[in-house]
Amino acid sequence: MKFGVIRFPGSCDDVDALQAAQRVGGAVLLWHADRDLQGVDAVIVPGGFSYGDYLRAGAIARFAPVMEEVAEFAREGGLVLGVCNGFQVLCEAGLLPGALLPNVSLKFVFRQVELEVTNADTPFTRACARGERLSIPVKHTTGRYYAPPDQLDWLEAEDRVLLRYASGHNPNGSLRDIAGVCNEAGNVFGLMPHPEHAVDALTGSTDGLKIFESIRADVADRGLLRVASSPAVR
Amino acid sequence: MRARVLVRPKEGILDPQGQAVERALPALGFSGVRNVHVGRLIELDVEDTSRLPEMCERLLANPLIEDYEIVDYESGGDGK
Amino acid sequence: MMSGSVPPPLTTSRHRALGLTDYEYELIVEHLGCDPGEVELAMLSLMWSEHCAYKHSRRLLSRLPTSGPHVLLGPGENAGAVDVGGGLAVAFKVESHNHPSAVEPFQGAATGVGGILRDVFAVGARPIAVLDSLRFGEPAISERSLYLLERAVAGIGHYGNSIGVPTVGGEIYFEQSYEQNCLVNAMCLGLAPRERLIRSAAAGPGNVLMLLGALTGRDGIGGASVLASAELGEEDEAKRPSVQIGDPFSEKKLLECCLELLDRDLLTSLQDLGAAGLTSAASEMASKGAVGIDVDVSRVPLRERGMEPFEIMISESQERMLCVVEPERVAAVMDVCERWEVLATPIGSVTSEDRLRVLHHGTVVADLPVHVLVDDCPLYDLEPIQPAIEAYPAPTPLLRGGETPAQTLLALLRSPNICSRRPVFEQYDAIVQSRTVRRPDEADAAVLALPDGSALAVSIDGNGRRVACDPRRGAAEAVYECAANLACVGAEPLGLTNCLNFGNPEKPHVAWQLSEAVDGLAEACGALGIPVVGGNVSLYNEAPGGPIFPTPVVGIVGKLPDASRVGRLGFRDEGDAIALVGEFEPSLAGSELGKLLGRPLRGPLPPVKANAVRDAREAVRDGIRTEALKNAHDISEGGVAVALAECCVAGGIGARVQLPADLELFAEALGCAYIVSGAEEAVARIGTVIGRVGGSELEIEGQLNVALSDLGEARARGLVEFV
């Protein structure tokens, strides 16, 4: 299986995402200006400060040529994971509901937090158990999840909140402690915490690996496994 | 035409920047200040002002969380 | 000098407005054989400034040892570099940005980080970590210092986080002495394959000089504005920003672009533009390469209209680099730059004459011999005189003096210089690039994994108050303490960078402090065999009340063989034996408790036995590497009681120890002693067993017994109300 990690000008955690993905499969970098997704099975929109967070975080990146392809890929059911700035890009692009606002503290916060898996029945969380706790770091200034109350009710009713900050661990004032949500079709997932920074016992926890493993398992199930040498098929 | 777009957080959305400013002013001796909100100003020279709302909807503001207001100016000169 | 004639009287004091003395101006005239033109005067005034020429410190700095078996780049390059094995080199340096930070702390600190990052990637290394060493006035009494602290931290975070380089460590001190002169020193380390390290020496007459990066504006021109031909009115003040604004996004693109250019072997040399902008970059490149350079300022892309040639030559606009490219490679360079959205402009060429010439639309507006710009600035000997009385007033006492040991311990843990820095380091991304094995507060040094399974360790240290009490020993202590921090994670030092933050060196007692401190650094570096690979000097940090504490700040980079065997700060398991390692004869001179009690700032500091320091350091280092030790923490500010408390809090477990009756709980001697724990045989082999890990209190028999939760709470509370 092959992951594709988007690189915008200003992406910071792209290489980290690439290295994390390479622990469960193959992975390539996808340049923002190229329209070629190189036949990947899953797309990761990584963390960082694409376009310097100018105007609004993710507001400019969402118009990159590669994002048009990602939108098409998502429409066709492809798996898309947005981490931190990636989550912001996906919300700005309308691929996910809601928006990310400045942290209540108005400060950048870097902290290892505990998350609760609220839906383990998705391509992104199937390697976890419902109610399981994951230890994953956050690092952001603009991570407060917001959606209008009726939209939040609807998200919860449809079980589209996949991860919540455990009690006492909400670092940014996200409404209803929401850490990550998915779209209606369940194939696009965005979260503020950084699973790619929780894959190696040497540098922290390994709980984040479960998200990558979930994606790999889902891709395998769909029969879309590709061997690195075979030509891409769409 | 020199246009100005004011972008501000939507009513009802928590605005910690506005709150921080509102808290700081009394400490400096300014009383009687309420309802502070912090937004953004975008200035641009534009040929076709009829396209401004679309620019706002698509890029300059995020309609989910922000309101925008277009202020037109007469063409020419440095307004102040 | 025109022979047989008396020099004409100086009819203009322009040079004085630019900071040149009459003597220096006369020397310039003598070297040139005539008065310098406007542009030349502007260039010379900056190249001959203290900041660029190190007039008062260069002779002193030659006392520092600079050679070592691993050194690849030494002082004088954009950054120093050492070989770390596996075909890799680590480049690193520390620099100050003190005065800009006092003016505008957010941008001052941010551009300080930006500048040191550029110095590192200018030698071809990818920046992999930043550390910052900060000093402010007392937060409890100074709104201004609180403001500076908050904004400087925000600025460092903004720049480092945005550009994707982790801030992995640092230190903060609060002393009345820094109230008017805050200190912001930023250190950066970068990683490069050995073959990618590049020097700044320009080479190849006929080669093209190219400017990469941001547009050039009027940033940083400041005092040189006296040279402007047009009178600018008050409303035009905005056109002369004294504050440089940093743009980390712009620098991120510049960084990736430069590293790709180097990977593709497209550059002959590379230099970043820092203080004195194009003037210093071009001068240094020409001087090192023993060539000349022509710069055509009319080709420099500008951000402002109507900029004069002298403004273009001395502008300090950020996020720009200068490079030399062979003519047949220019197109390829432009291609790479275009992909990264980095502006690239040919602005001149390398020549075979030994001159720096500035052209403007075909006219030569400056033509100077390179050596006059770079080498001929006079160097001044200091006239050090030891002060007869204490140079600094005693601090205001915060403790009465009748406190119990337990109360004293809690007061120290809560004090701004010792308490937890969590409110600060939580504003920094410490993990981007996925190398960080030890984050802030996990160990005494930051640790970063290398691809071959080994790891780098880095720490930055200095204590101005102790140096004020005893400059020679205090400076030496900074080196010993920094090396001790590395030993606590199992690392061996490879090289050192230093920033000397002092007052006005023309004053005899400051000259004495500087001279003594440099000798202390030299002595300690020699004793431990650590070469100085580069550094920075910041002088004239004075207020009407007098100079700041003499503050040499030391950063050391080291290596350890196995990234999975790295030391930790905290105690681990119930029953582990605790030992005191090293010869420890502390006193209250220059100590934190001395400060809280309002004691005068008076030396001497405890003498250091170099052999004992070496033995202790090696024993701890090896104990960590073999996993014989479960934790290691050097005893520093606050003495042995504070060190024990810190080990308990970090480990979340108590301890019960018995100390020799004559060992004062809070007395200090830095860099020579450690608290370690592990199996009894292991720790007894290298130190004196003093007790055991366990329980939920710290008990020092016969002296104090404090609950772990109280220790943690006192330590955690310290900065929270301030940040």
Image (spheres, coloured by chain):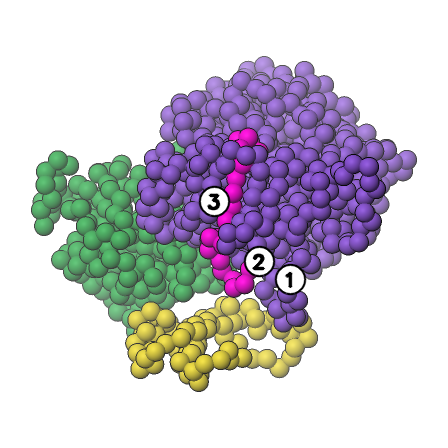
Chain colours: A green, B yellow, C purple
Mark 1, secondary structure of its residue: loop
Q: For the point 32% across and 66% down, which residue is it? A: A98
Q: Where residue B6 is drawn, which disc sits there?
A: none
User: Which residue lies most toward the right here?
Assistant: C388
Q: Which image quarter is the N terminus of chain B in? A: bottom left
Mark 2, secondary structure of its residue: loop
Q: Which image quarter is the C terminus of chain B in? A: bottom right
**How would you rate the neighbour count of disc 2 (Cα within 10 Å): few for under 14, some for 14-19, many for 20 or more?**
some
Q: For the point 52% across and 72% down, which residue is it? A: B18
Q: Amino acid at mark 2?
A: Glu
Where residue A34 appears, as percent x and y from the top left, is: 23, 51
Q: Earlier in the sequence, mark 2 or mark 1?
A: 1
Q: CA distance from mark 3 to mark 1?
A: 25 Å
Q: Which residue is mark 1?
A: C229
User: Which residue lies most toward the bottom here?
Assistant: B74
Q: Amino acid at mark 3?
A: Gly
Q: Which residue is mark 3?
A: C348
In the image, is residue A100 part of the stretch drawn in magenta?
no
Task: Specify whether C670 is left or right of B55.
Answer: right
Q: Which residue is mark 2?
A: C308
**How would you rate the neighbour count of disc 1 (Cα within 10 Å): few for under 14, some for 14-19, many for 20 or more?**
few
